[in-house]
């Protein structure tokens, strides 16, 4: 019955591909993996902020940017980074009707950027492909098992995608043979233009760290103006592929100049600027969320121990226990 449902859904999607995105917006959070299992007390803050979706992010690990083996689902990982942990998180979220995107991610030793993952020999490329398939197909099976609404096939892997496009098309077919829901890929904000397989997935996924302002404390108006140079391109791109755009990640740090290079997470940025985070986030909501080509997004990032994270002295991405949390709560309540 479920296969028949998704067959009909696929026909509807294909037949109405040029129609603007009309489903409820995905008002999501990126639910960070933890050492521990979760229960309803960890979900309550998600509900309180009026989120209707969560990205669950199990992890695989690679030694360096030229190493072909992905280590995943081991006893040495945190519980939330494993298959069992991801399943337990999803089952707990489901009890409160939170929809789920499973978004397996890779961590490269010392935090090197995954976009630079590139092999030096054909033999190593083939080993990487085999290892990545093992990693991602294991979570495609989980996505089907738990009826996840969305499955993300990769995150910010530009060099891998660029150098092995045929592999990615084959991989998508293999995933579709296992998982019957919606697919996306999380391209970096400056990568998605070159990603070759958008017509083969259901959402154009973007980690939306677009620069919008050079101001130390940007105003809402300044950031909205900054979005104007991106919005027309996003709309045109969505129309080109007849696919809605999904912000697989979005958010701002509570630091000075947060809108200038929103992707930066290095510790050298030591200021705390709660107003900058609030204004940049409000501008994103006002500039983008109402657009017909926009499906919604997942806020980066949300920790399970709400009372112990974020706060007025924190300058990282999380909105928890900061003024911007109230803004998100209010906006998500309205943005259905």
Image (cartoon, grey):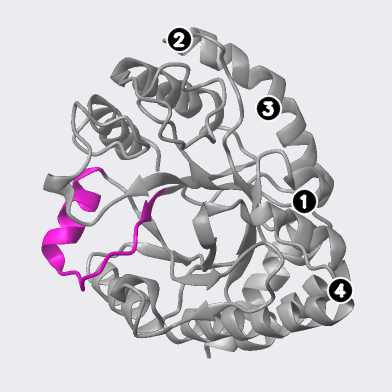
Whether 330 is drawn above or below 95: the answer is above
Q: Which residue is mark 4?
A: 121
Q: Residue at x 12, y 46 (%)?
A: 307
Whether tag 4 and tag 1 are in contact, CB under 8 A, the answer is no
Disc nearer the start of the sequence (4/3)? 4
x, y percentage for residue 285? 46, 28
**Is 51 included in the stretch rendered in magenta?**
no
Q: Nearer the viewer, mark 3 or mark 2?
A: 2
Q: In whole angstroms, how far apart are the C-alphas of marks 3 and 2?
A: 23 Å
Whether tag 4 and tag 3 are in contact, CB under 8 A, the answer is no
Element type at marker 3?
A: helix
Q: Quadrant of residue 190?
A: top right
Q: Which residue is mark 2?
A: 216
Element type at marker 4?
A: loop
Q: Nearer the viewer, mark 4 or mark 1?
A: 4
Residue range (magenta)? 28-49
Q: In the image, 159: left or right of 263?
A: right
Q: Residue at x 62, y 86 (%)?
A: 134
Disc nearer the start of the sequence (3/1)? 3
């Amino acid at each position: 019955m479920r296969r028949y449902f998704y067959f009909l859904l696929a026909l509807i999607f294909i037949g109405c591909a040029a129609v603007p995105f009309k489903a409820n917006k995905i008002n999501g959070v990126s639910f960070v993996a933890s050492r521990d299992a979760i229960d309803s007390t960890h979900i309550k803050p998600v509900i309180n902020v009026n989120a209707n979706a969560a990205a669950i992010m199990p992890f695989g690990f690679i030694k360096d940017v030229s190493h072909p083996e992905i280590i995943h689902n081991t006893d040495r990982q945190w519980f939330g980074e494993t298959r069992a942990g991801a399943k337990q998180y999803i089952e707990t979220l489901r009890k409160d009707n939170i929809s789920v995107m499973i978004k397996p991610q890779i961590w490269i030793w010392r935090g090197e950027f995954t976009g630079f993952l590139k092999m030096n020999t054909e033999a190593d490329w083939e080993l990487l492909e085999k290892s990545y398939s093992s990693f991602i197909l294991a979570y495609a099976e989980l996505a089907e098992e738990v009826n996840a609404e969305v499955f993300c096939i990769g995150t910010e892997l530009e060099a891998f995608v660029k150098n092995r496009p045929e592999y990615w098309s084959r991989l998508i077919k293999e995933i579709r043979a296992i998982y019957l829901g919606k697919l996306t890929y999380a391209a970096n904000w400056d990568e998605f233009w070159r990603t070759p397989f958008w017509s083969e997935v259901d959402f154009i996924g973007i980690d939306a760290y677009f620069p919008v302002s050079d101001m130390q404390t940007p105003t809402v108006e300044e950031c909205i103006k900054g979005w104007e140079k991106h919005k027309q391109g996003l709309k045109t791109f969505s129309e080109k592929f007849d696919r809605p755009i999904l912000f697989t990640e979005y958010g701002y740090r509570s630091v000075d100049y947060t809108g200038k290079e929103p992707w930066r997470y290095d510790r050298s940025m030591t200021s705390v600027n709660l107003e900058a985070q609030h204004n940049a986030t409000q501008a994103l909501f006002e500039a983008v969320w109402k657009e017909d080509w926009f499906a919604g997004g997942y806020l980066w990032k949300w920790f399970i121990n709400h009372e112990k994270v974020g706060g007025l002295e924190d300058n990282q991405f999380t909105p928890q226990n900061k003024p911007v949390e109230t803004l998100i709560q209010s906006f998500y309540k309205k943005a259905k």
